[in-house]
Image: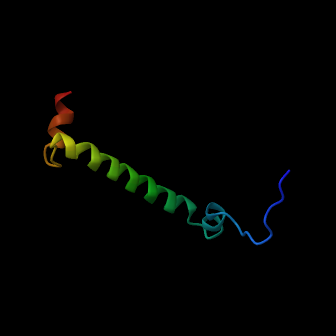
């Protein structure tokens, strides 16, 4: 079994949890990823933000 490096500290998740902000940071990261993915999906199809609700109603 490999030994842990004694110079390594906590993981980022552990650090954020100790500060009590892990859930907030995770939620913000998820929101940003979804917004980026939505933006990338809309661009090739020429879908404007204004037209998006109309397209959802048509389905």
Q: Position of residue 16 (x, y in %)?
A: 60, 66
Answer left or right for 7 relative to 43: right
Near-viewer residue (2 or 46): 2
Q: Residue drawn 73% across and 69% down?
A: 8
Q: Position of residue 57 (x, y in %)?
A: 18, 33
Q: Position of residue 9 (x, y in %)?
A: 72, 70
Q: Position of residue 55 (x, y in %)?
A: 17, 35
Answer left or right for 45 relative to 22: left
Q: Quadrant of residue 51?
A: top left
Quadrant of image for the C terminus: top left
Near-viewer residue (4 or 50): 4
Q: Residue drawn 56% across and 66% down?
A: 21
Q: Residue drawn 44% across and 52% down?
A: 30
35 to 45, vertically: above or below: below
Q: Residue drawn 84% across and 59% down?
A: 3
Residue furthest to the top in view is 59
Answer left or right for 4 relative to 50: right
């Amino acid at each position: 079994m490999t030994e842990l490096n004694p110079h390594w500290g906590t993981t980022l998740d552990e650090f954020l949890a100790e500060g009590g902000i892990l859930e907030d940071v995770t939620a913000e990261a998820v929101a940003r990823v979804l917004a980026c993915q939505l933006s990338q999906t809309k661009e090739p199809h020429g879908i404007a933000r204004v037209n998006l609700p109309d397209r959802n109603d048509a389905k």
